[in-house]
Amino acid sequence: MLRSTTVLLAAALMMSCSVGCRVDPQTAETQQSSVHIHEVLASNRTSITDEDGDYSDWIELYNPSESPVHLRGYGLSDDHRDPFTWVLPDVTLGGGQSLVIFASGKERLDPAGRLHTSFRLKPGGEEVVLTDRSGVIIDQVEIPDLPPDISLGRHPHTPDLWQVFHRPTPGLVNGEDGWLNPFDGTQGTPLSEVQL
């Protein structure tokens, strides 16, 4: 079972991120100065539960700047053709802080509680798009087809590189144990050493 999961994971990564998923160059400058998608888990079975006790998929946003960013009116979507599938409520994300939003389809908008999108993520591969109030895409990522409880997130010291994590870190700093290139093991943990 481990061998077949490893082969499937390696194939998915090769197709989606042959040397690590990279940020779209057209949005890179915007991302350096604003909130961005930090980590995504599209098939949550054991990571964290929402307030109902459900293992809902989740999207983590992060503000790398020192200044707070008011997110009211920002859009989050799983379809770039409909960037405002879900609109963030009156929430402010402080400098250096992250926000975990459940992609559960429950559509909960209470800023005092946990936030839930109106859409769910598909475990077989999906895109996540973050737009500002005017509809300009400030960040987006294609999530490859990954096994359950394997997340896609930014490298902690090189945020324009994406890694696959076998230990998701919602609300925490991403680890350095992710895989950038599963075939050569030169960056991150070599795929052959990962215990799924």
Image (cartoon, rainbow, N blue to C red):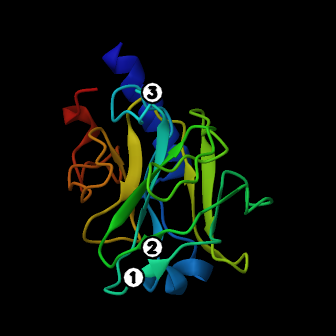
- Mark 1: give few (<14), some (14-19) or many (20+) Cα within 10 Å: some
Assign the N terminus to one quadrant of the image.
Answer: top left
- Residue 87 relative to residue 167: left or right: right
As measured in the structure, the alpha-carbon distance from the residue carrying label 1 to the one carrying label 2 is 6 Å
Asked whether the residues under the numbered discs 1 and 2 touch, taking CB atoms below 8 Å apart as contact, a structural biologist would say yes
Give the labeled residue for mark 1. 68
Residue 154 screen position, x and y as percent: 37, 61
Residue 159 screen position, x and y as percent: 36, 70
Q: Which mark is residue 92?
A: 2
Q: Residue furthest top?
A: 1
Q: Label 1's element?
A: loop
- Closer to the chain start, of discs 1 and 2, is 1
Q: Residue at x 54, y 73 (%)?
A: 71
Question: What's under tag 1, amino acid-wise?
Answer: Pro
Q: Is residue 29 above or below residue 150?
A: below
Residue 47 screen position, x and y as percent: 33, 34
Give the labeled residue for mark 3. 54
As measured in the structure, the alpha-carbon distance from the residue carrying label 3 to the one carrying label 2 is 26 Å
Asked whether the residues under the numbered discs 1 and 3 touch, taking CB atoms below 8 Å apart as contact, a structural biologist would say no
Q: Residue furthest right?
A: 81
